Image: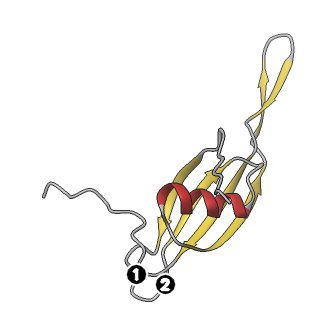
Amino acid sequence: MPVREFFPNMYMALVSIRYLRHPTRPTQAVFRVQPKMNKLEIREYLRKIYDLKVTKVMTQNWLGKRKRLTGKRRIVGYARPDFKKAIVTFEPGSDVYTPPPSDD
């Protein structure tokens, strides 16, 4: 049976990396993903596209910030889009991120 990979219009923005090259703790990365993505899709996305071995995925749903603009005649309210944060733990020894060499 063929393996189907289907990731239409899914984005993952890397926010930060924790415990990179720490002697005892596994490396964690924080991504900003779409609210409709679930843990399995995040794990498969990183495994199939970037060939990373994921141990654990934790997610947090965030509401977009609500704002109000006041003008001379009326008050206009708007909101930034909602997003989801994914905290991904990788297997020890996996090469998640290699920082560029410094010029020093």
Type of colouring: secondary structure
Residue ID at (45%, 75%): 19
Q: Marks 2/1: CA distance? A: 6 Å
- The image's mark for residue 7 is none
> Seen from this angle, which residue lies furthest front?
1
* Residue underneath mark 2: 25
* Quarter of the figure that contains the C terminus: bottom left
Going by the numbered disc 1, the residue's amino acid type is His
- Position in image of residue 56 (x %, y %): 64, 75
Relative height, residue 60 to residue 78 (above, below): below
Q: Mark 1 falls on what kind of element?
A: loop
Q: Are marks 2 and 1 in contact (CB under 8 Å)?
A: yes
Q: Mark 2 falls on what kind of element?
A: loop
Residue ID at (63%, 64%): 43
Give the crowd class for mark 1: few <14, some 14-19, many >=20 residues within 10 Å.
Answer: few
- Which quadrant of the figure has residue 87? bottom right
Question: Of 24 and 62, which appears nearest the observer?
Answer: 24
Q: Is residue 43 left or right of residue 102?
A: right
Relative height, residue 16 to residue 65 (above, below): below
> Seen from this angle, which residue lies furthest top?
73
Residue ID at (45%, 89%): 24
Residue ID at (60%, 44%): 11
- Position in image of residue 23 (x %, y %): 39, 87
* Quarter of the figure that contains the N terminus: bottom right
Give the crowd class for mark 2: few <14, some 14-19, many >=20 residues within 10 Å.
Answer: few
Q: Is residue 101 left or right of residue 85?
A: left
* Residue underneath mark 1: 22
Q: How many marks?
A: 2
Going by the numbered disc 2, the residue's amino acid type is Arg
